[in-house]
Image (cartoon, rainbow, N blue to C red):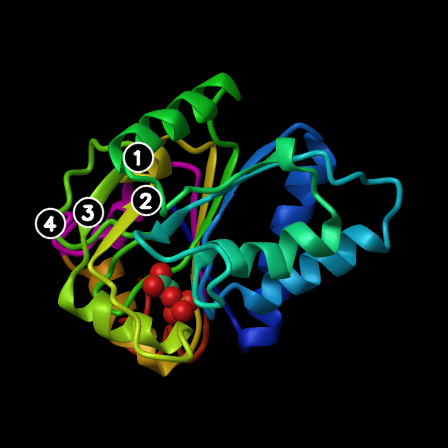
């Protein structure tokens, strides 16, 4: 795993956008898994700008959504699906066959997990995963204590996730379960980028990078990834021990 620290959110976001762009440029059929959330907003916007201004690079990649809130419809502005449509899929006019998001409204979420796994397998696995870190150290909805061997799965949300997650919704949302790609995908992805911004993330970033590697802090598993990159702005890195 490689750690990089950038001056601020804008610089960090640009570097992440470049990584996604280079992936698409160097391998047009790439399978890219993207998280939603506040952190990746600018990176995705910059990525779409980079692509649009380089007509020679066509957006011929497959986008897989990392996770979704069970029972929240894609029309809800707080859903991961809405976020990815607004910030990536719609600006780039990605056709439906290049997009696979979890259907969190399905009456059979276990079947939905199987379908997602089959889809990813049919594409030959994930080339690049871009993820954030939750205030409890989660990645996607891989909550503390999750088994590291899981692929797609449904999980009861941690108290922190249920509380923090309200920030994405305009009214109070009932957040109880999530559907998510598991840590096995993260560890198997050819490249995995975890990025974080702001001092609010500094304590959990420190725990992930300097504490024990176990799923008590799921993001600590990034340290086992040979193709893993952790990218931080100075504020998110502010509590790290020099030399980490
Ligand atoms: P955030 O979410 O980017 O909104 O901070 C990160 C996460 O929960 O993974």
Eye-nearest disc, 2 or 4: 2
Q: Decide which of tag 2 and tag 4 comes sooner along the chain.
A: 4
The CA span between labels 1 and 3 is: 10 Å
Q: Decide: few, some or many residues near mark 4? Use Cα within 10 Å; few <14, some 14-19, many ≥20.
A: few
| Separation of residues labelled 3 and 4 (CA atoms) | 11 Å
- At mark 3, the secondary structure is strand
Q: Position of residue 225 (x, y in %)?
A: 34, 39
Query: Residue at 36% across / 79% down in the picture?
Result: 171
Task: Give the vertical position of 86 relative to 118 (above or below).
Answer: below
Q: How many marks?
A: 4
Q: Is residue 142 above or below residue 44?
A: above
Magenta span covers which residues?
212-232
Of pointers 3 and 4, the one earlier in the residue sequence = 4
> Decide: marks 3, 2 in contact (CB < 8 A)?
yes
The picture places residue 119, in percent across and down from the top left corner, at: 46, 24
Distance, label 2 to label 1, CA atoms, is 6 Å
Q: Nearer the viewer, residue 25 or 223?
A: 25
From the image, tell me which residue sits under label 2.
180
Q: Which residue is mark 1?
A: 152
Q: Residues within 10 Å of mark 3 (few under 14, many from 20)?
A: some
Picture layout, residue 139 above or below residue 9: above
Q: Is mark 2 within 8 Å of ligand 1?
A: no
Numbered label attached to residue 145: 4
- Residue 139 covered by magenta stretch: no
Residue at image mark 3 = 155
């Amino acid at each position: 795993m490689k750690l990089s620290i950038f001056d601020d959110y804008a610089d960090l976001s640009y570097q992440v956008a470049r990584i996604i762009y280079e992936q698409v440029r160097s391998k047009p059929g790439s399978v890219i898994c993207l998280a939603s959330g506040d952190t990746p907003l600018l990176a995705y916007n910059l990525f779409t700008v980079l692509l649009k201004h380089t007509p020679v690079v066509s957006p011929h990649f497959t986008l897989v959504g990392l996770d979704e809130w069970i029972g929240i419809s894609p029309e809800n502005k707080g859903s991961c699906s809405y976020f990815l449509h607004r910030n990536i899929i719609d600006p780039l006019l990605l056709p439906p066959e290049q997009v696979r998001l979890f259907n969190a409204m399905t009456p059979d979420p276990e079947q939905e997990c199987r379908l997602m796994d089959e889809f990813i397998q049919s594409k030959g696995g994930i080339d690049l995963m871009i993820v954030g870190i939750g205030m409890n150290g989660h990645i996607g909805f891989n909550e503390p204590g999750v088994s590291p061997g899981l692929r797609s799965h449904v999980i009861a949300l941690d108290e922190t996730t249920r509380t923090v997650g309200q920030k994405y919704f305009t009214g109070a949302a009932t957040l109880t379960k999530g559907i998510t790609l598991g840590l096995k995908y993260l560890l198997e992805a050819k490249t995995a980028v975890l990025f974080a911004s702001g001092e609010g993330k500094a304590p959990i970033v420190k725990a992930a990078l300097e504490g024990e590697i176990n799923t008590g802090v799921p993001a600590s598993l990034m340290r086992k990834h040979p193709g893993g990159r952790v990218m931080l702005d100075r504020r998110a890195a502010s509590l790290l021990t020099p030399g980490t």
